[in-house]
Every structure is written in structure tokens, then in C-alpha cells.
Amino acid sequence: MLRGSRFLTPRSPSPEAAKALLFALARDEGFDAMGIARADAIPHAGPRLRQWIADGAHGDMDWMPETAERRAAPDGLWPEVASILMLGLNYGPDEDPRAVLAQRTRGAISVYARGDDYHELIKGKLKRIASRFVPRAGGPERVQVKVFVDTAPLMEKPLAAAAGLGWQGKHTNLVSREKGAWLFLGAIATDLALPPDAPESDHCGSCRACLDACPTDAFPAPYRIDARRCVSYLTIEHRGPIPHELRPLIGNRIYGCDDCLAACPWNKFAALGHEARLAARDENRAPALADLARLDDAAFRARFTKSPIKRTGRPRFLRNVLIAIGNSGDAALAPEAERLLADAHPLVRGAAVWALSRLLAPAAFARLRAAHDGETDPDVREEWLHAIPVS
């Protein structure tokens, strides 16, 4: 996890020159949007975060309450920080990512995860900017710089809005009038007091396209998200079985969800992402569920090397694949689910039970239930006991 990288130089530039230099270096690295926010620019973020956590909307993301105080304001993470350069990199897809949702025997993977892990890409760019900036900054003072990607407890979206990159839309994600909703964010913090940029105003108006697009109704109100109902949280961060009532709503989304982002009308003004290394791997555009269900641990790691999907791990990923198989309506996929009833991990076995309850006739499912009466894991036994075949 990248916590920060420090670079030192013997002198500081003038604030205006330092800002111009940082912007020029950021453009050289291909960033599409940039702006400066003061370290104290988001006083509202801390109280909102604490209330969100108090409501339990963070689910089982335990690191949220653990890092809340550091996350609430940049100086909680680094006391010397004065200014933050916020950067955005457009990763707009070359097709509507929702098209795969109609292909029920194939999996839908979020756009950001179809290629190489963007954390590594952004981290490399930020470190190159910092390493080029420091020796050229000049001056008698010692200038400190740290770089961050979203694995660090820094509230990038409020800071990016404060820096003028866009505004947080009703889906809580950053939206830009020029780049739409497809922006990776990175941050370079410094103890230099740089001229800040004006924050962007909210341009959502009366539109609620992103809210209406959510398949699980994860927005209790505009600008508020309940992670416990969000498909991205459920398929990536959530460690246990997915709640039964939400499983049919997930469809064939096996890693993340782009529905609220893709629905944003501001996307029509966004050009496609130009960074070649952000390109989707062909095998991740609409992978066959049957192929994914056959991945053992070694094959999973090999297929998703350098991918953010690898961090989720095979059990959670196979859980998602089996939910999609159960939602496919295709009984031809039942043998794939039945084979996974013998998987070593109970999370996979339990999801296989649910998938089969959706695909098999009641009599066939009853025979399987009797054959697996010796299941010892309590969660899997619960799946068997309460599964009601729908065929």
C-alpha cells in the first residue's frame, strides 16, 4: 500500500512558478485534469465521513473507522501539508459498458478493472512528476512532496472538487464537464503554499439518471451512498456471502458496477481515454461465466496478473461468478456450479448452492441437497436449508 513518498530539495520556487512547473510535468505524464486545493479546503468532509460511518453505511470496510481521523483532513495524514495538486486521468471506455449486461452467460467487469491495475500506473506517473519537480524547484528552503493514490487515507473526491477538477455528483463520484465521470485521481501533496484553484460548482441540476440507474437502490438520497447495497462494494470489498435479497439484482456483474457512471449525461462531452496502458484486455470485456467457474487458484492468479481483480482473491471472485450463473437462467451452466459444491472454500460452496437452486428443477435440487447432507460449514448448511428452487 502506498502511504507516501518524500523527496527533498534545497530550495523552494515562487508559488506561481512551482504551480506552473507541476502543471507542465503533469501534462507531460498525460493527465487530463489538474488543480490545486489548499490543505484546509474540505472542512465539511470530516463530519460527513463520521456520520456515514456512524450510520454503518461503510459495511465491513473496517479500515474506514480505523483511519477516519487521518482521512478527515489532509493534515491528519501529514501535518506539514499546505497544498495538494489533484490530478485526473481520463479512462473513458470505447463502448457502453452496460451492453454486456444483456449477455447473461457472460460476466460484466467494471471498466477500470478490465486492464492493468491503475494504482500502479498512477503511482508511477506521480513519482516521476515528483522526482522531476524537486531538483528543478530551487531555493533556500527545503520543499517536501508526497504522492498518493487511493490506497492511502486521503479523500480524493472532495479534494478534487475543491481543486476545480469537477464536482461530486449525486452518485458521490467526481463529474467533470469536460471529462464526464471517467477519471482516475491522484494527488501530490506539498508543504509549499501554492495558489489554489477555484472549486467547481455542482451542475447536476434536477437530473437523477445516476440514481435511477442503480440496480440495487444503493442511494438512500442524492449525494449519499450506502455501500452495503452497492454492487461494487458487494462484489469487491464484502468478504462474506452476499445478502440473498440483493443477489438477483446483481445480474451478471462479477466485479464492480459502472451503471451510475455510464448513465451520467456529462459523459457525452468526454473524449475516450488516450492512455494505451488503460486499454481493456480482450478476455475481460465479456468473459464466459463457464470459463471463469473453472479457474483454480493458480489459473485465477495467472489470468488476473497485474489486475486489480487479483487482490479480491479467487473465493470472492468465484462467489460473484456463481451469483451470475444463478442469474443467467441457463441450465447448461448447472454442471459448472455443481462441480463447485466440492470446492475447498465455503464461500464458493455456498454460492454454488444458491446458483443451483436457481437453475435446477425442484426434484433435482432435492437430490443434490440429500447428497450433501454431510456439509459441516454453518454458512453452507444455511444455504442448503433455506434454498428454494425457482425452476
Image (cartoon, helix red, strand yellow):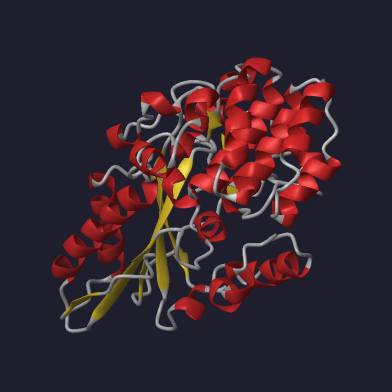
Q: Where is residue 148 in the image (x, y as percent from the top left)?
A: 38, 63
The answer to whether residue 48 is above or below residue 20 is below
Q: Position of residue 340 (x, y in %)?
A: 58, 36
Asked if residue 187 can be seen in this view, the reply is: yes
The answer to whether residue 233 is above or below residue 272 is below
Depth check: give the residue in front, 229 or 248.
248
Query: Residue drawn 65% across and 47% down?
Result: 234
Residue 206 as seen in the image, left or right of residue 307: right
Asked if residue 215 can be seen in this view, the reply is: no
Total label count?
0
Q: Where is residue 125 in the image (x, y as percent from the top left)?
A: 27, 52
Depth check: give the residue in front, 340 or 196.
340
The answer to whether residue 97 is above or below residue 225 is above
> What is the quadrant of the C terminus in the image?
top right
Quadrant in the rendering for residue 356 = top right
Query: Residue drawn 76% across and 32% down?
Result: 248
Q: Where is residue 292 in the image (x, y as percent from the top left)?
A: 49, 30
Query: Residue drawn 53% across and 24% down?
Result: 290
Query: Residue drawn 46% across and 58% down?
Result: 150
Depth check: give the residue in front, 17 or 166.
166
The answer to whether residue 222 is above or below residue 249 is below
> What is the quadrant of the N terminus in the image?
bottom left
